[in-house]
Amino acid sequence: MAPALASLARPVLNVIRGRPILAIFEVTLRCNSACGYCDLPLNRGRYEMTREEIRRVGAELYRDGLRFLFVQGGEPLLRRDLPEILEDLHALGFGLTLITNGTRFTPPLVRRLTSLPLNLSVSLDTLNRQRYRSIRGADQLAEVLAGIDLLKDFPHPKYLTTIVSEANRDEVESMVRFAKAHGFMPVVGAYHWGIERYGKADKGLQYDRRMLADVFEQVLESGLVPRGYFRQYLRDNVRWLSGGALDRCDAGRYSIAIDASGNVASCLAQPFAGNLLRQSLSDILARFDRETIAGCSDRSSCNLLCSRVVGSILRHPVTAARTPLTLKQAEV
């Protein structure tokens, strides 16, 4: 088989066989925020892979059929060699989405990122400085807004992701309008807590699920959120918040999570099953506790974007095909 055909066939075979095509990659364990809803294990003196190790691991993952990486942290922009890492991963053939809190953009960095076919997701939950400081544990709203201004002419898909909690549920529609006014596709998700090793239980952020379902329904009915996958994700949130069961989670099947040390889990909520610096992906996949993953999915304990993306697209192919890549496409 020709190399190009083999490169195309491998991820298709992975989908058929229920093997990963997407990875959430925590490129650094450091963060300059202290979000009330985040309980991810950040830097506690643990090792971070070098650029060369990431390139080697990335090449092996690509041969295993992975094609998409959500590059996040911690805060990924804290890695000084992040542009070079992204360039390496792009050269390997990965489709990349960079997920950031948006506090560290500079004109030179934006120029570097613009040169790559890179999707960009900026996390912003509120436009109120006091609320931002309360939710994020840092007084950085001004830096985020300055970064968003620098991204005005960013030519690739860009998203503004708002996590909805009790602290900002009255601000959701204004956040969607803000995103669109600045050329970002709005993505709205719910705060989750008490899910295995993911989601800090912050009393100030916890909400009544029925009340939050009403908020999501109002946003859905407003028509402000673009068609396709984005509205489907809103519908899934309404179903989850209303106590309904979600479809099967993708964790460990179509997607995996990799931390900056090379440790692999089925998703951000599950325990590590191996390390890519010492073991092959196939060996690690064989060690996943499928019953635990299925039990977590059956409880519908979360609707995380990372672990339900691929399955949602496969279950709703027509809806997925109608999803615009940019806000300009959404307005056509």
Image (cartoon, grey):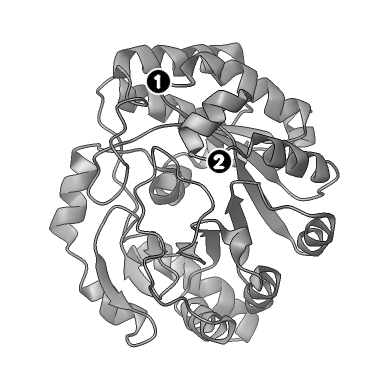
Q: Nearer the viewer, residue 281 or 257?
A: 257
The residue that label 2 is drawn on is 320
Real-space Cα distance between discs 1 and 2? 30 Å
Quadrant for residue 297, please give it. top left
Quadrant into which the C terminus falls: top right
Seen in the picture, residue 18 relative to 161 is either above or below; the reply is below
- Please give the name of the residue rendered at 22% of the width and 49% of the height, measured from the top-left corner: 196
At label 2, the amino acid type is Ala
Seen in the picture, residue 90 relative to 304 is either above or below; the reply is below
- Please give the name of the residue rendered at 39% of the width and 32% of the height, measured from the top-left corner: 191
x and y percentages locating residue 43 in the rendered image: 41, 64
- Please give the name of the residue rendered at 54% of the width and 36% of the height, measured from the top-left corner: 229
At label 1, the amino acid type is Glu
- Please give the name of the residue rendered at 70% of the width and 58% of the height, measured from the top-left corner: 118
* Between marks 1 and 2 in the image, the one whose residue lies nearer the viewer: 1
x and y percentages locating residue 38 in the rendered image: 39, 44
User: Can you tell which mark lies on residue 323?
Assistant: none
**Is 54 positioned to the left or the right of 200 in the image?**
right
The residue that label 1 is drawn on is 166
